[in-house]
Image: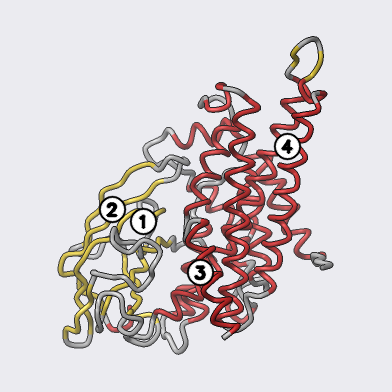
Amino acid sequence: MDFSFTEEQSMLRDTLASYLADTYDFDKRRAALKTDAGWRPEVWKAFAEELGILGAAFSEAQGGLGGGVIENMVIMEELGKALVVEPYLETVVIGGGFAKHAKGWDWADGVIGRIISGEMLCAFAYAEPQGRYNWADLKTTAKKDGDGYVINGAKAVVVGAPWATHLIVTARTGGGQREAQGVSVFILDRNTKGVSYRDYPTVDGRRASEVTFENVSVPAGALIGAEGQGLALVEQVMDEATAALCGEALGVLSRLHQGTLDYTKERKQFGQPISQFQVLQHRMVDMFIQVEQSISMTYMAHVHLDEDAAARAKAVSAAKVQIGKACKFVGQNAIQLHGGMGMTDEMAIGHYFKRATMIESQFGATDHHLARYEGLSFKTAA
């Protein structure tokens, strides 16, 4: 397949890559991670005002630059190359995704406008300990209370919550714990009364929270989409988020492969660079093949995002399976070829390995997406 980027998409890539090269090198990132905040708000401000990338994936009618999912992929790949921790995925892809796809939601334009301006940062509170990767497995409830709702429950590993201004929350408004019907989605200010947080750093340098909701009142307008009909919306947004995550993985994998290739040219044993050893050359070729296959599968997933739900889900799961395998193979080989020093905090390769490891399980591990792909394939055949 010939997948060529437009001139505008190439310019977007080059502009972001240049900015990150100047302002987001490895040492500056490490320093930011060690601060109490754990990120750099000035970078987010530059994304909004200087680069305008927060609006790249929104239509011109929504105040954006007229792009879509391909722009998200281009941006996420560059963010992956620099190991950017600022919450583009959580805010623009997921938060913006809900606003774009929720039909008839009165708050949508306001949310998109605030995302583009950099005012609103989102975190998606969907995961619960018993749920694993089943978006419908919810114990968190939202019960009608006059014109609004009262939310009670708890969410685990809400990535980006310590930085977020708003939470997007899944809750059950009807049906049984795992039923498709009865899932609803809400947005609320992080400081809403009754919401409490336990913040912590993740292994890949990001920040997350355990979030508890105790009699949290939200207005009717906070409901995203139709009451009880939110599962299809969640699945659409999460498929787009998973595809974007695969885009980030391309950046991480390219740095793991290139960093290892450079190291093997410098590291000498028996009077010659270890890159001259045939067995290691074979290993590097295998890493290269995994990266190239990941690129093809990720591009294919993005091509299918506008198709029907089954075709979209099947393409995304296929890409995530390949990405999961590549993250494991390329990451482990990169560390092995660097030796023990590869996992030290001072070397970038270890940080890329940690992010690759987290990507493998985020939004569904390899075995989950393999089973999902298999199920969708049998359903199509039937």
Q: Measure the C-alpha gap from mark 4 to mark 2.
A: 36 Å
- For badge 1, the amino acid type reads Val
Q: Quadrant of residue 178?
A: bottom left
* Mark number displayed over residue 350: none
- Image point (38%, 41%), residue name: 201
Q: Which residue is mark 3?
A: 372
Q: Measure the C-alpha gap from mark 3 to mark 4.
A: 32 Å
Mark positioned earlier in the residue sequence (3 or 4): 4
Q: Are marks 1 and 2 in contact (CB under 8 Å)?
A: yes
Q: Which residue is mark 2?
A: 210
* Mark number displayed over residue 158: 1
Mark positioned earlier in the residue sequence (1 or 2): 1
Q: Nearer the viewer, residue 374 or 89?
A: 374
Asked whether residue 344 appears in the rendered view, the answer is yes
- For badge 2, the amino acid type reads Glu
Say whether residue 273 is left or right of residue 141.
right
Q: Nearer the viewer, mark 3 or mark 2?
A: 3
Q: Residues within 10 Å of mark 4 (few under 14, many from 20)?
A: some
